[in-house]
Amino acid sequence: MSDRLTSDVVAKVARLARLDLTPAELEQATAQLGDMLDHFADIDALDLADVAPMTQPYPLVNVMRPDVVRPCLDRDEVLGAAPAPQDGRFRVPPVLAGEG
Amino acid sequence: MAVPSTATEIAAAVRSGGTTAVEVLEQHLVSIGERESEIHAFNLVTVDAARERAAAIDAAVAAGHDPGPLAGVPVALKDNMCTRGVPTTCSSKILEGWAPPYDGTAVSLLASAGAVMIGKTNLDEFAMGSSTENSAFGPTRNPLDPTRVPGGSSGGSAAAVAAGFAAMSFGSDTGGSIRQPAALCGVVGVKPTYGRVSRYGLVAFASSLDQIGPFTHTVADAALALQVVCGHDPLDSTSIPEPLPDFSAVLDRGVDGVRVGRITDLPAGADPDVAERVELAFDVLRAAGATIVDVEVPAFTYGLTAYYLIAPAEASSNLARYDGVRYGLRVDADDTNAMYSATRTAGFGAEVKRRILLGTYALSAGYYDAYYGKALRIRRLMANDFAAAYERCDVLLTPTSPSVAFPFGSKTDNPLAMYLCDTYTIPSNLTGDPAMSVPFGTGADGLPVGVQILAHALDEPVMLQVAAELERAAGGST
């Protein structure tokens, strides 16, 4: 078992990602992610301070277009694909528990 | 007359009136009827829409109109490519039944070129996997040996062409998801330069790596496919505003004078039967007049680590949109936070959850610099190393997959073993360079081996030129 990761950290990450894990899933995830981080240790020794990060393969430049009205997605078609549309909007449960 | 099987022949015959789109379609539907229940290449076969479409193509030809370069070609699309009004599931329960309100750009271009969309193909959920075993709707079987996987994540698209269900198909390649299944199913698969094909309407996995590309029977068909789907698109801000070359122009030129690089520090791991075929490919190209050049790509070995930090990090962000609000599954709960968690927990499969956790971890405070930040710097090293190699050679040759198609279940208990399938394909996604797999004979148990040809950004023509030479050799005595 890797010492790079504890189940507390995995539980926190799962909360951030809005995923519920059972105790068995948490244990398995901790072991599997730990194995991966062990494998990724091949980069630990690399000194990359002088290397610039690369986020995109192709140099991006800002693109402007004329500010003119164009056709867009059909509202009814978009809302029709939603789980709970209501009055032209996306209906959701109360944002704060205990309300509504 | 027998219906032709390559896209080039089909389009020529339909345009000239030598056959009809309806006849071609029905032939492919017969193949689907015979074997699809065993292979499960498709999540959905759009029989009625395809028949209407084929009839319309034939009507156009009869009226003296040219339906386009893919006239009457039955085309299958990976089920992460948005098709208006046609379910697009990403093989995930979280999108089951969702029908997009628009067509992706590649989908529109195929329709404009006269292609007949025949169905949506199975994949590893959200394109995360190398075997198509991660589909929420069950695995796809390899048509060449149904006890084995077709590769992944675009396993359904590769199987559809290999089984004769479609003359051409499309997939997406984030770390090898076109090239590896092409190799395992014995068909041609191309990942174009990042930005060549618009990603508008491709459901995002890792946005800086994802690229759409074709599966075909032949290299000429692949060139034809690229000619149709490549090109600048204002709807994708990462689309490359460069003119398109004629991808078919150099296929018959041979390889005299082409410099083919051999990576001397390539990570080990290819099975001997695969390595032997790659050696033979070098021999064939040398005999045909190519110069073999030894090059080093030191960062290659760190590709797997960089990829499995960057791709999950981007995925964890991209998949945040599946929250039960705007589309797909919702599992109701008392408040929004509980609804998000209940929906995502029920809707995502094990591998998708694993990658979201890994990506969220790599991006989280305290670990960002050690993992994600470092991976981005390795990505730069990788691009520099490949650029240096391409100063000395026109293409590089490697195995596509370390092994031929493997049996079901052989890697499912060990995620890391599955990730190692991508060792040779990952670098091209990190750099954005084009790469393709071309079938080159068989290895263990008579199963196909794919040779991978890599080229520098925008250099698809020379890559296809070398692939065509290997195809000619493989069709001969080798």
Image (tube, coloured by chain):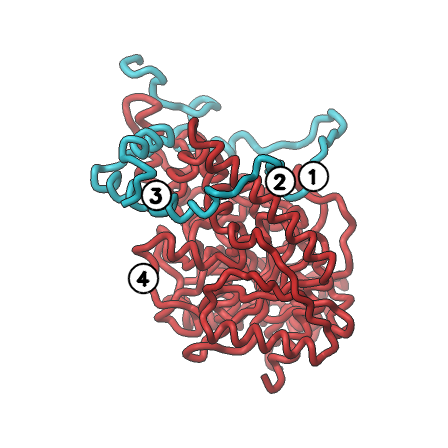
The chain letter under disc 3 is A
One can see residue B57 in this view = no
| Residue B382 appears left or right of B349 | right
Mark 4 highlights which residue?
A: B409
> B316 or B165, which is in the foreground?
B316
Q: Amino acid at mark 2?
A: Gln
Circle 2 packing at 10 Å, graded few (<14), some (14-19), many (20+), is: some
- Foreground mark, 1 or 3? 3
- Foreground mark, 2 or 4? 2
One can see residue B9 in this view = yes
> B137 or B17, which is in the foreground?
B137
SS type, badge 2: loop
SS type, badge 1: loop
SS type, badge 3: helix
| Residue B218 appears left or right of B321 | right
**x, y percentage for residue B59?**
67, 62
- Foreground mark, 4 or 3? 3
Mark drawn on residue A33: 3
Q: Identify the image quadrant of the C terminus of chain B.
A: bottom right
The hue of chain A in the figure is cyan
Mark 1 highlights which residue?
A: A59
Asked if B319 appears above or below B3 in the picture, the reply is above
Q: Amino acid at mark 1?
A: Pro
Mark 2 highlights which residue?
A: A56
